[in-house]
Image: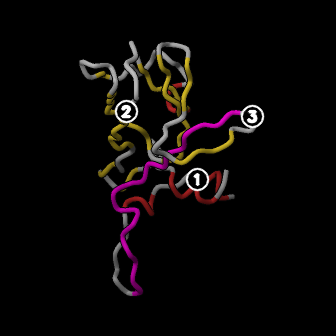
Amino acid sequence: MTLLAALLQVLDSAHLGTYRVAETATVDFHLELGASVRTVSLAGSFNGWNKDANPMKGSTDGKTWDLQLKLPYGLHQYKFVINGDQWTPDPSAKSVDDGNGNVNSVLTVLPPDYLENAAPGDRKLTKSGLGHEPKELA
């Protein structure tokens, strides 16, 4: 696991006293198409690439599709599945080669405090800085 992936991961087992660290964020997915289609769904690393797990809601003309989904913090690869069999990367997202000759969209879900600036002596700890997996640091 890369250091970046380890830093982004917040685990179910992470506890701070009686306070539990949040583990998901709501992500809005949006797709606009030039032609009308019957169905669009979202498949990715977060649902085992199951094309039926996350159907999107379409506009009445079948050209605009939306889905709001809670995803765990970290890196996720995904594609839109149009009409059940056309796997399409998100045109508005970064892409990555999956190592098998395919291109997937990639998304990084960060905790809300991840981008807080740290200052020497500020005596502040961010919740995202406390989530870790000790066995991965050994």
Crowd rating for badge 1 (residues with CA inside 10 Å; few <14, some 14–19, many 20+) = few
Q: Residue furthest bottom?
A: 121
Report which residue position mark 1 lands on. 5
Of badges 2 and 3, nearer the viewer stands: 2
The amino acid on which the numbered mark 1 sits, given as a three-letter code, is Ala
The answer to which image quadrant residue 92 occupies is top left
Report which residue position mark 2 lands on. 32
Residue 51: give x, y in percent of width and height.
51, 18
Mark 2 lies on a secondary structure that is: strand
Of badges 1 and 2, nearer the viewer stands: 2
Crowd rating for badge 3 (residues with CA inside 10 Å; few <14, some 14–19, many 20+) = few
Nearest to the observer: residue 8 or residue 51: 51
Report which residue position mark 3 lands on. 101
Decide: marks 3, 1 in contact (CB < 8 A)? no
Task: Tell whether 98 sits left or right of 94.
Answer: right
Q: Residue furthest left?
A: 60
Mark 1 lies on a secondary structure that is: helix
Residue 56: give x, y in percent of width and height.
35, 23
Q: Residue at x 49, y 45 (%)?
A: 93
Nearest to the observer: residue 75 or residue 121: 75
The amino acid on which the numbered mark 3 sits, given as a three-letter code, is Gly
Q: Residue at x 69, y 33 (%)?
A: 102
| 49 relative to 38, above or below | below
The amino acid on which the numbered mark 2 sits, given as a three-letter code, is Glu
Mark 3 lies on a secondary structure that is: loop
Residue 42: give x, y in percent of width and height.
45, 26
Nearest to the observer: residue 107 or residue 22: 107
Whichever of callouts 2 and 3 sits on the residue coming sooner in the sequence is 2
Q: Residue at x 63, y 44 (%)?
A: 96
- Cα separation between marks 2 and 3: 25 Å
Q: Quadrant of the C terminus?
A: bottom right
